[in-house]
Amino acid sequence: MEQSNLEKLYHQHFNKTYRSAYLVTGDHQLAEDAAQEAFLKAFANMDKLRELEKFGSWVSVIASNYSIDLLRKKKRMVFTDSIAIHADKNPGTSPQDSWEKTETAQEVREALLLLEPDEREILVLKYFNDLSIDEIASAINVPSGTIKSRLFRARKKVQKLLQPKNQEKRLNNKVSSKF
């Protein structure tokens, strides 16, 4: 493939790839490293990609996998509030809607970062990269049934992590509405 075509692919898919890596690592530097490494690996193995239309998803999966490897090597995770910049694509129109959406998104991101990297990867691939169960299974070489059960457990964990916050909000809303 020509250099100019590779550059186009890079520029077209870098943001999504970086966002995937960032959502897994929670660290800008690790995400940058993972995205760069993902593109290098993808370009070196272009002959293995059957459908060029799937390049974006493919390179994002490579970045997610590499992000998990980096986390295992570093055995640390850094949380930063600026993750909202990369995960929230469409803020609300009114200030109230925007605030509520940002607050909820922040809670979800905090819960996401409390999961194990493997669980986080599956949620990122499913909900941030819009991959199907079969695409995820194929990408990480795990049976579809296993992906379904892991996805179910990961969603339950996130739901459980969010539950106390939601109950506290409802209680605060009830109390504030009475005064």
Image (spheres, grey):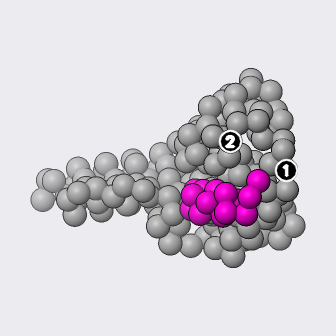
Which mark is drawn over residue 45? 1
Residue at x 87%, y 67% (from the top left corner): 73
Residues at marks 1 and 2 touching, judged by CB atoms closer than 8 Å: no
Q: Nearer the viewer, residue 157 or 36?
A: 36
Instruction: Let me know if residue 13 is in the magenta part.
Output: yes
- Kind of residue at disc 2: Leu
- Residue 103 falls in image quadrant: bottom left
Residue at x 39%, y 47% (from the top left corner): 167
- Kind of residue at disc 1: Asn
How would you rate the neighbour count of disc 2 (Cα within 10 Å): few for under 14, some for 14-19, many for 20 or more?
few
Among numbered discs 1 and 2, the one appearing first in the sequence: 1
Q: Quadrant of the C terminus?
A: bottom left
Q: Residue 129 placed where, x, y %?
A: 58, 45
Q: Nearer the viewer, residue 145 or 48?
A: 48
Instruction: Let me know if residue 14 is in the magenta part.
Output: yes
Q: From this viewpoint, is residue 110 visible?
A: no
Name of the residue lying farthest toward the left: 179
Name of the residue lying farthest toward the bottom: 29
* Secondary structure of residue under mark 1: loop
Look at mark 2 in the image and give the residue it sits on: 52
Q: Residue 151 placed where, x, y %?
A: 65, 35
Q: Main secondary structure of the magenta part?
A: helix
